[in-house]
Amino acid sequence: MASYASYAFLAPDISLTAASFPFLVAIVWLYSVVRAVFRLSPTPPYDLFACYLLLLIGAVLQLGGVLYDRVVGAAPWPGVVVLAVLMANLGGVVLVLGVLLGMPVGVPSERVNIEEIVSI
């Protein structure tokens, strides 16, 4: 994402706001990696869940925007590499969101006495 953002800043036909979007996505991915490495938890971190949901919305909007421009605006396809990167971004977000949703939620902390837990 950071390499695409660097290319977007050098491209003459891309505006500054459109070129800054990939940097924001790269910063969110960097935060999620640093957060996962330095603050391990057995339960899903809800700040990462919110970040991944925002990344999912952004990935769907990016890919949907390309498809919308193609169908409605009769714009040409952006290229195989760009479509592959957009689909890989969407697939990566869905993958990490699935891993996060697969984590257990009801893990008791070390302050809870295990013998006092009653299950139905």
Image: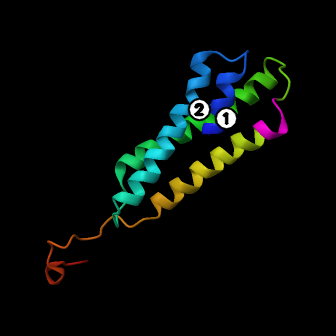
Label pair 1/2, CB-CB below 8 angstroms: yes
Q: Earlier in the sequence, mark 1 or mark 2?
A: 1
The residue closer to the viewer here, 20 or 69, is 20
Q: Residue at x 81, y 29 (%)?
A: 78
Q: Residue at x 83, y 20 (%)?
A: 75
- Residue 20 at x, y = what percent? 56, 25
What is the magenta range? 78-82
Q: Quadrant of residue 12?
A: top right
What kind of secondary structure does the magenta stretch mostly adopt? Answer: helix
Q: Residues within 10 Å of mark 2 (few under 14, many from 20)?
A: some
Q: Residue at x 42, y 49 (%)?
A: 49
Question: Does residue 3 appear to the left or right of 81 in the view shown?
Answer: left
Q: Which residue is mark 2?
A: 22
Q: Which residue is mark 1?
A: 4
Circle 1: residue type: Tyr
Q: From the viewer's perspective, is residue 28 above or below residue 100?
A: above
Q: Residue at x 64, y 31 (%)?
A: 6
Circle 2: residue type: Pro
| Colouring chosen for the image of the structure | rainbow
- Residue 19 at x, y = what percent? 61, 23
Element assignment for label 2? helix
